[in-house]
Image (cartoon, grey):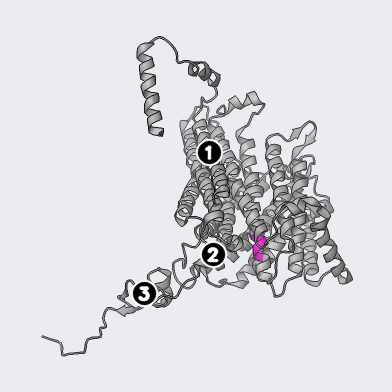
Amino acid sequence: MLVLGFVSAIIFLILYGILFPDSDLPVISSVLPVFEGVFDSGIWFFILGVMIGVFAILGTMLTEATSE
Amino acid sequence: MGLLTTMLAFWIIIFVMFVMINRGIWVFTDVSKSLTMFMLEKALGPPIDFVEGRKGSASTTWIMHGALWMIPSSTITFCGLWLAHDPDALHSLSSWGLNPSSSSLILAGILTASYGSGGMMLNGVAMHVIPELGGTRLASEKNAVLMALVWTIGVVILFIGANNPEILGIKVMLVSSGILLLSGAAVIVNILLTAASRTKKMALPAWMMIIGLLAAPISVVSLFVSGAHDTGTGQWLATRMTGASFSLMLAGAILYSASRGSGNPLWSRSLAAVTMVGTILTISSAGVFDGGVAADFLGIQKASFEPTRNEIIAGSFLLAMSLIPVIALSANVMATMRGDDVFMENPDHPGMPEINLAAIALVPISIGSLLVHTDHLTGTGEFSGIQWTLAMMGVWLVFVPGALGSALCIFPEASGRNVLSMNRSRWAYWLMAGGAFGLIFSMMSDFSQASLNQADAIIEISIVDRLSVLGSILFYGTVIGSIYHCLNLISGSFRGSLVDDDQPNSSTSISSPYVLTKETTVRKILAQREGKLDTVVIPESNSDSPGSPTEL
């Protein structure tokens, strides 16, 4: 399902670019400028990795505690 | 002579406490025991009923908290290292009112790693080791579990205080030290009650951990008794005595774990005694270099560091003497782990690689710290540029690995389950150790910067930044290693194999005989994991076929 969703999204983006070449993407093009100047240093990629790790720990705690 | 007076007060109070633990407090012993036990549990009311009280729960809780603290402390340190070469990297946080700088993050990283990560793991180890060596149970498991939460709150406030010392006129670090003192006092009382109910003579590692726990509050008391708390020398000495407190805890933990994990007896009790007495009698070179941190903890005015000539001589001598217990500890741990052979007997036992790393890195880092401290004490100041990197190396190559190794070693016994995967544990070790060695590049960068400063060079040399970038990126391995270790411990506490299942079963099936080409010992065969107790050993030169004349 994940692969299907990913492929569908890519197809949609390509089609949108062909059909509306001069138009920005709806919603996404409005949201992205909010983060302009925020993630402008390489450190954020590393911090993103830490966040994934922290969520992995939280997920592990939840699944281990609730599994039969 | 504020320095010697403070040290004298410290020695006397430690000695008095040692005698009191052994002899009791006259007719008040029984009354104080029952009263203190009441204060630890019933007096706390409903909160004490929310926590678990089964055997080993206190130790496991403190270890888990300590392991979880490794992630924020290593991440903060990583960010501090990054900001050293890219000061505006986190400027977007200013919209939230946060303006972190490299120095504040590095200080916060060291403090959270010391009190949150290493400190909590060592307390957890102490809660297992002291009852184990005393042949008794921890006096109050429930109180100790509850205090882990209080201590964690104290460390969170400590982190805030390291970045923002004063909020709304309140000294944040002082609030933090108050909470840590409250929790620490409960832990000390709990441990003292445990020691009082011992049924056999306790081995030296247990005494080291008890004295280590007591040394931190005693150092503050001796500082105020001597009146040196408002002098620069006194504040510097306070950080040194705190270093001694952590060093004693660490020494006790790794000596016990090295013996437990390898299955070898402690190599030398004399060296263990030298480690304990030597650490108390000398000035430790471990810990942060800046006495101002102690002033922040105590909520007093920072004083300028202006030691007298006599203080410089006495301080330098006692600092130099601190290498004796350090070398004794390192040699004792390594010899215990290796037993009578030239290689480690049981390298796959949890925590052994970490303890080995700590024992190996202990001596060079202590020598480096000694040089920097002597340089600082004499007012030369040539090495001041590397002091923070050296402190970080001490934390991430000695203190945290030693505490983590001990915690991993006793975790199966305390929690009843093994860590989930030895393979993941091994990966985590290599990531953490490799990342921490990245600090060598940060130190090279510091040296380059110091050389440029000395030469008054105006030209911009990119090598300083490049080395700094390399050091910070490599340190990210420590962050990932911390996450791996935490995942392994958390999953292990739920799904790890039960310790009882690990008991070796008698087996008669032998997959392959162990072929000998020369004489060896049973110890070496077992240590190489080539055989079990019933493995058939076949020397290659012998056979069961009947002898016959040699054909020519």
Left or right, B221 with respect to B379, comes to: right
Mark sitting on residue A50 = 1
Identify the subunit bearing mark 2: B
x and y, in percent, of residue B373 in the image: 64, 49
Instruction: Identify the magenta region.
Output: B125-129
Give the amino acid type for the residue marked by disc 3 in the picture.
Answer: Ser
Residue drawn 72% across the image and 74% down it: B199
Q: Same subunit under labels 1 and 2?
A: no
Query: Callout 3: helix, strand or loop?
Result: loop
Give the amino acid type for the residue marked by disc 2 in the picture.
Answer: Val
Q: Nearer the viewer, mark 3 or mark 1?
A: 3
Give the amino acid type for the residue marked by disc 1 in the picture.
Answer: Val
Quadrant of the image occupied by residue A55 = top right
Residue drawn 58% across the image and 49% down it: A65
Q: Nearer the viewer, residue B195 or B35?
A: B35
| Residue A17 in view here | yes
Query: Callout 1: helix, strand or loop?
Result: helix
The reply to whether callout 1 and callout 2 are in contact (CB within 8 Å) is: no
Q: Which residue lies furthest to the top in this view?
A: A22
Mark sitting on residue B499 = 2
Q: Residue furthest right?
A: B27
Identify the subunit bearing mark 1: A
Residue B126 on the magenta segment = yes
Label 3, label 2: how far apart the Cα atoms are: 23 Å
x and y, in percent, of residue A32 in the image: 51, 19
Q: In this view, does B448 lie above or below A7?
A: below
Q: In this view, does B147 lie above or below B193?
A: above
Mark sitting on residue B509 = 3
Report crowding for label 2: few under 14, some 14 to 19, many 20 or more residues within 10 A (C-alpha). some
